[in-house]
Amino acid sequence: MNFVALSLALITGCVVCLQSASATLSAVYTDSTNGSAYMTDIQTTDLVNSGQATLLSASASLAVTGFNVSGLNDGIGDLLGGTHEAFWNVAPVDITFNLNTNSLSGGSSTGYDISQIQSIMAWTGSNFCNQTYTISVEPVGSSSFTLISGTFTDPSYVHGNDLGQNKASKSIVTDSTGTIASGVQAVRLTYSMSYGDQGIVIQEIDVNGAATAIPEPTACALLAVGAVFLARRRQRA
């Protein structure tokens, strides 16, 4: 490998190392028989909220059984059957948020550090609130998703169409390091249902985080210079 190629490889390595995180994920669940219990926790300025410069698009792998996919990230909750939630009676369903990596339109070319994911389900009359899902991310420059979690499931959820239970549920996923994943250009939640469930009504999904920092140029430059120096010494020897 020549000196220039070696230097570039090391500098590239500085960028790539920011695109992976040591993930020890955990989910905290809360449940309520009050359908409106977590409506005030819905966020309006997270990375995937509709209208944010950080969001490119949002989609679902299955057509909604009722209401509207746009309700997943509009910053509004609704128990009246309007357009501010999404309902499926079949699963699994992939919910995908593509983030904006175009710096010219307010995005981050280095991707995003994801710090928290919040999922809120709620309805009245039926307990369509089984929060069972996995999380996958797509790194910047990739064309495929990587599963980064096991299956999160609510330990206190009561399955079936029980009118007196679980009219609202909230789950919050974080990582012990503070960063779920780094250098991310897309986030996917895959929801499933268990035997006896009648469906799921997702009121809102919030994804928190910030643009992935650009690697410290001084550190990368020193690594490159050091590599060139060592390569020259070996060549002379």
Image (tube, grey):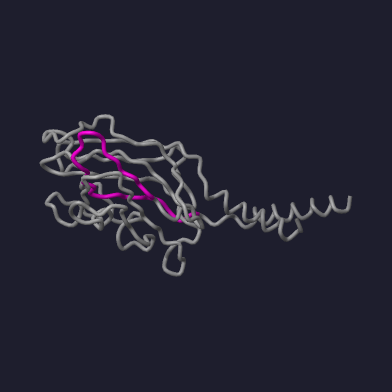
Quick check: is 143 in the magenta stretch?
Answer: no
Quick check: is 208 in the magenta stretch?
Answer: yes
**39 horizontally vs 3: left or right:** left
Instruction: Kindly identify the residue that appears in the image at 44 percent across and 43 percent down.
Output: 147
- Place of residue 19 in the rendered image (x, y in percent of width and height, measured from the top left): 52, 50
Please provide the residue range marked out in magenta: 188-212
- Place of residue 62 in the rendered image (x, y in percent of width and height, measured from the top left): 28, 52
Q: How many marks?
A: 0
**145 horizontally vs 28: left or right:** right
Instruction: Kindly identify the residue that appears in the image at 67 percent across and 53 percent down.
Output: 10
17 or 90: which is nearer to us? Answer: 90
**109 horizontally vs 133: left or right:** right
- Place of residue 226 in the rendered image (x, y in percent of width and height, measured from the top left): 74, 52
Give the main secondary structure of the magenta stretch: strand
84 or 214: which is nearer to us? Answer: 84
Compared to 137, does 83 lie above or below? below
Q: Quick one: quadrant of the N terminus?
A: bottom right
Instruction: Kindly identify the residue that appears in the image at 11 percent across and 33 percent down.
Output: 164
The quadrant in which residue 36 appears is top left
- Place of residue 56 in the rendered image (x, y in percent of width and height, measured from the top left): 37, 62
